[in-house]
Amino acid sequence: MFDLGKQQINVSCDCGRRHSVTLQDVTNRKNIRCGCGTTIQLTDNADSVRKSVSSVNKSMNDLEKMFKRLGK
């Protein structure tokens, strides 16, 4: 089963270091601790990531169900 929330994205610190996080981390507003000592607060403005992940996951589930019905 496809889950868009598990997809990795990169987040950059002001010091230039890059950190890999999942879209689920963004929707959960996780704090990332950089090696330079900075704490990066992930934010989901207007819940756009949460809504998009939910919409894509629903569409993929519906597509899987459709393929199963066609295979009968």
Image (cartoon, grey):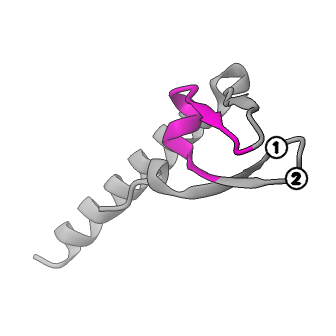
Q: Label 2: how many residues lie within 10 Å, few (<14), some (14-19) or many (20+)?
A: few
25 drawn magenta: yes
Marks 2 & 1, CB-CB < 8 Å contact = yes
Which range is magenta?
Answer: 20-35
Residue occupying the far front of the picture = 36
Q: Identify the element where label 2 is drawn.
A: loop
Side (left or right) of 68 relative to 23: left
Side (left or right) of 18 relative to 32: right
Where does label 1 land, which residue?
Answer: 13
Determine which quarter of the picture holds residue 13: top right
Determine which quarter of the picture holds residue 29: top right
Nearer-the-camera pick, 67 or 33: 33
Where does label 2 land, which residue?
Answer: 16
Nearer-the-camera pick, 7 or 35: 35
Q: Label 1: how many residues lie within 10 Å, few (<14), some (14-19) or many (20+)?
A: some
Q: Position of residue 50 (x, y in %)?
A: 55, 32
Q: Position of residue 46 (x, y in %)?
A: 70, 20
Side (left or right) of 19 relative to 56: right
Q: Identify the element where label 1 is drawn.
A: loop
- Tell me which amino acid carries mark 1: Cys
Residue occupying the far left of the picture = 72
72 drawn magenta: no
Quarter holding the C terminus? bottom left
- Tell me which amino acid carries mark 2: Gly
Residue depicted at x 67% and y 52%? 19
Residue depicted at x 67% and y 27%? 44
Count of numbered circles in the view: 2
